[in-house]
Image (tube, rainbow, N blue to C red):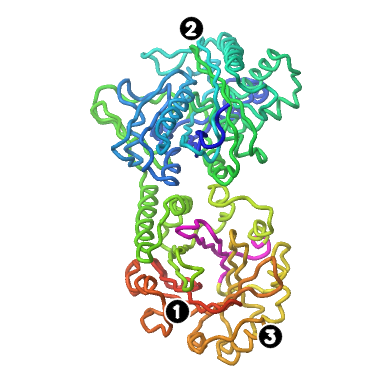
């Protein structure tokens, strides 16, 4: 079977989006007099996504695909394939609207595929073929639908809406798709929607029978083509017109293959794949890949495990194929973003649902604006001259503009240093925290350091809001860093439970990507060092050096904690530092006490003007790893130290956001010697805390 080694092609990234509104099945049951258990236990559904009047497959598709384009860029995407059975036009592909909303290059082919709920799998297989032909290319595959039945129809309780976007690439980061596939087609009228209808028609029992027939047919062909044995799969992603259909289909496959139908084993194979569908409802083409998102987001480590996919589309066409989960996949997931997409939906009553269900635009070719309802990033503005008009929502447009502007500034700053700016490292960070960058109060700064070990990197940092959002958990959910069992992974959470945090900061490199989270305490509520040193995950070296800090009047002056995740170190920043700490004799005494080399005269002279200092500690030593004194200035021309030509050019020309230039420089001392850090503020607000 293919799918391993250098020939591997598969799903490199995955993102989904759903609607503004949600109708619970409890609300539906109360309206129609149905026992809610019929929905919760009978079909396994608890709620259904309901589009706002200004949402449709295009707005959901753009919202799903935008994070992928932001993370990876569009340079390698030459094809967009949009699979849907609720198309918005009989001629123009819905993906062309998405192409426009996302600002993709004109050198792109865009097509739309239709075969009921199976279409996305055809799109995936076509994408794999294109990448086989040219492994440098990537294909953006989108599956999006709005499942809609007549009011009072038995299918009404299975409605839903969502879009899934997948980036198909060589050497994928999530799932390698294997050969062979088992395919099956039969001419059956189990579900259909004539052109003159806005809602689908379905023969429920016939549809279930046709689905189960397709399960047998695809498995037969899959095994004849040399596929895996059934026992090799650790999980199965089935098309889910309703959640319990996946269980029905899997039981049928097990019986067909002569396996026991142990309910515990079935649950282990399926339960995690149904998490999202239970709340979203049937998303037609997106359904089986929404199941994949749920599995990857909720399962324990699946590295190297085989997943079976059963994609079924009424009418009918089906396919069974396998995929293998790639090592390191968890670092690329969007788990929290996906959960937020479901959690942010607004509950509506039955009357509102009914109004949305029956909403339609006039067909007279006039100008018909859509009511503003969605808070998502894209909306259907209305119809004009029989044409659908889409737009970016204002608040999200400013966030996108902030990201684009800041990336351009970072790219220019890196160029001054001769440092390659990697969009794969920078854009995911900017996009993940884009709402913070759009805030007027956000502080943005760039930092370089002298010395051989710092060559080739430009660090960027910014404050982030809101303060009640855990920035490390957010980084994990957006694939910016990998989960770790090391104490560094638990430290921020413990700090949040122990100390009142006023705001956070993020630090990343244009080459190295996400690095640090800073936790800021309010200036009038500096923290006791003993309270922080006592945290279970804090390096023991902080407690070991508590007496040293206390002797210099620093034990109650902790203003910031910085956690460096890749280097596994912690910076402890002290504010309102006693002036005596910056006197040359005191500095000499402090450095000798902690085993640092004697500083230069230049270093002592610069440190006399310092406003603060920080110490760096790690988990592998009881000693202080580094100590740094920070000085603020608006003119670095008088800096009495030699700096590399590239850094000198950076200092002279680095972009800044208006007003006087503001620099902070740091004099750092480590056992291997001293070096200097230079930080330029691109965006700064009066009252913002200085640190380096």
Q: In this view, does 135 lie above or below 212?
A: below
Residue that sits furthest to the bottom in the current view: 585
Classify 10 Å Cα crowding around label 2: few (below 14), some (14-19), many (20 and above).
few
Residue pointed to by mark 3:
551
Quarter where residue 365 is shown: top left
Indicate which disc, 1 or 2, sits on the residue closer to the N terminus: 2
Q: Is residue 87 magenta?
A: no
Q: Does the magenta stretch include residue 516?
A: yes
Q: Does any portion of residue 93 appear in the rendered image?
A: yes
Name the residue nearer the viewer: 66 or 503: 66
Q: How far apart are marks 1 and 2 (CA)?
A: 75 Å
Q: In this view, does 328 lie to the left or right of 646?
A: right
Classify 10 Å Cα crowding around label 1: few (below 14), some (14-19), many (20 and above).
many
User: Residue 533: x and y, percent?
Assistant: 70, 70
Which element carries disc 2, helix, strand or loop? loop
Residue range of the region highlighted in magenta in the rendering:
495-522
Query: Dividing the image into 4 quarters, which one contains the N terminus?
Result: top right
Q: In this view, does 384 lie above or below 518?
A: above
Q: Distance between the residues labelled 2 and 3?
A: 85 Å
Q: Is residue 76 above or below residue 644?
A: above
Please report contact status of discs 1 and 3: CB closer than 8 Å, yes or no. no
Which element carries disc 3, helix, strand or loop? helix
Indicate which disc, 2 or 3, sits on the residue closer to the N terminus: 2
Residue pointed to by mark 1:
632
Quarter where residue 373 is shown: top left
Residue 187's mark? 2
Q: Which residue is drawn at 39% across and 72% down?
A: 647
Name the residue nearer the viewer: 589 or 634: 589
User: Residue 688: x and y, percent?
Assistant: 47, 71
User: Residue 249: x and y, percent?
Assistant: 63, 18
Q: Residue at x 66, y 27 (%)?
A: 233
């Amino acid at each position: 079977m293919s799918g391993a080694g250098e020939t591997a092609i598969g799903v490199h990234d995955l993102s989904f989006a759903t609607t503004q509104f949600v109708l619970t099945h409890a609300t539906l049951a109360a309206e129609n007099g149905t026992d809610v258990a019929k929905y919760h236990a009978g079909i396994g559904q608890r709620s259904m996504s309901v589009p706002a009047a200004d949402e449709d497959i295009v707005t959901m598709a753009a919202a799903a695909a935008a994070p992928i384009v932001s993370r990876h860029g569009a340079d390698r995407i030459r094809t967009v394939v949009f699979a849907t059975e609720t198309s918005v036009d009989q001629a123009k592909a819905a993906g062309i609207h998405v192409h426009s909303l996302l600002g993709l290059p004109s050198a792109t082919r865009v097509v739309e595929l239709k075969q009921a709920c199976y279409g996305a799998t055809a799109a995936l297989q076509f994408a794999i073929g294109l990448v086989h032909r040219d492994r440098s290319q990537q294909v953006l595959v989108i599956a999006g639908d709005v499942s809609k039945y007549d009011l009072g129809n038995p299918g009404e309780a299975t409605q839903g809406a969502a879009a899934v976007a997948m980036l198909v690439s060589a050497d994928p980061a999530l799932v390698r798709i294997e050969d062979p596939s088992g395919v099956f087609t039969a001419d059956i009228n189990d579900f259909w929607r004539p052109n003159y209808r806005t809602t689908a028609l379905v023969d429920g029992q016939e549809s279930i029978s046709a689905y189960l027939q397709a399960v047998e047919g695809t498995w037969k062909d899959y095994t004849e083509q040399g596929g895996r044995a059934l026992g090799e799969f650790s999980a199965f992603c089935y098309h889910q017109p309703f959640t319990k259909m996946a269980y029905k289909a899997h039981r049928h496959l097990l019986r067909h293959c002569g396996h026991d139908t142990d309910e515990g084993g079935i649950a282990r194979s399926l339960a995690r794949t149904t998490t999202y569908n239970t709340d979203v409802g049937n998303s037609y083409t997106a359904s089986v890949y929404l199941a994949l998102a749920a599995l990857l987001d909720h399962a324990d480590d699946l590295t190297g495990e085989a997943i079976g996919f059963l994609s079924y589309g009424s009418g009918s066409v089906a396919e069974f194929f396998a995929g293998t989960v790639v090592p390191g996949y968890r670092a690329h997931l969007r788990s929290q973003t996906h959960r937020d997409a479901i959690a942010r939906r607004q509950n509506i009553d039955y009357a509102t649902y009914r109004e949305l269900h029956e909403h339609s635009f006039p067909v007279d070719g006039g100008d018909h604006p859509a009511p503003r309802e969605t808070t998502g990033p894209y909306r259907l503005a209305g119809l004009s001259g029989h044409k659908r008009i889409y737009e970016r929502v204002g608040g999200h447009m400013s966030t996108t503009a902030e990201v684009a502007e800041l990336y351009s500034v970072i790219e220019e700053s890196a160029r001054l240093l001769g440092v390659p700016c990697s969009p794969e490292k920078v854009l995911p960070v900017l996009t993940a925290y884009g709402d913070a960058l759009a805030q007027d109060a956000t502080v943005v700064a760039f930092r370089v350091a002298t010395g051989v070990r710092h060559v080739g990197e430009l660090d960027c940092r910014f404050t982030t809001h809101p303060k009640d959002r855990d920035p490390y958990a957010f980084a994990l959910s957006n694939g910016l860093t990998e989960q770790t069992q090391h104490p560094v992974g638990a430290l921020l959470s413990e700090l949040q439970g122990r100390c009142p945090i006023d705001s956070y900061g993020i630090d990343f490199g244009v080459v190295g990507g996400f690095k640090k989270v800073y936790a800021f305490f309010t200036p009038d509520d500096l923290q006791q060092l003993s309270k922080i040193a006592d945290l279970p995950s804090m390096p023991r070296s902080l407690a070991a050096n508590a007496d040293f800090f206390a002797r210099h009047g620093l034990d109650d002056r902790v203003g910031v904690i910085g956690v460096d995740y890749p280097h596994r170190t912690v910076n402890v920043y002290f504010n309102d530092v006693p002036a005596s700490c910056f006197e040359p004799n005191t500095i000499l005494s402090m450095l000798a006490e902690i085993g640092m080399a004697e500083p230069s005269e230049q270093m002592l002279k610069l440190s006399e003007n310092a406003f603060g200092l920080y110490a760096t500690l790690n988990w592998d030593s009881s000693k202080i790893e580094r100590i740094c004194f920070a000085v603020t200035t608006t003119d670095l021309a008088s800096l009495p130290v030699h700096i590399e030509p590239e850094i000198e050019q950076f200092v002279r020309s680095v972009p800044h956001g208006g007003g006087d230039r503001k620099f902070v420089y740091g004099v750092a001392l480590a056992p291997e010697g001293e070096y200097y850090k230079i930080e330029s503020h691109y965006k700064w607000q009066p009252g913002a805390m200085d640190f380096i």
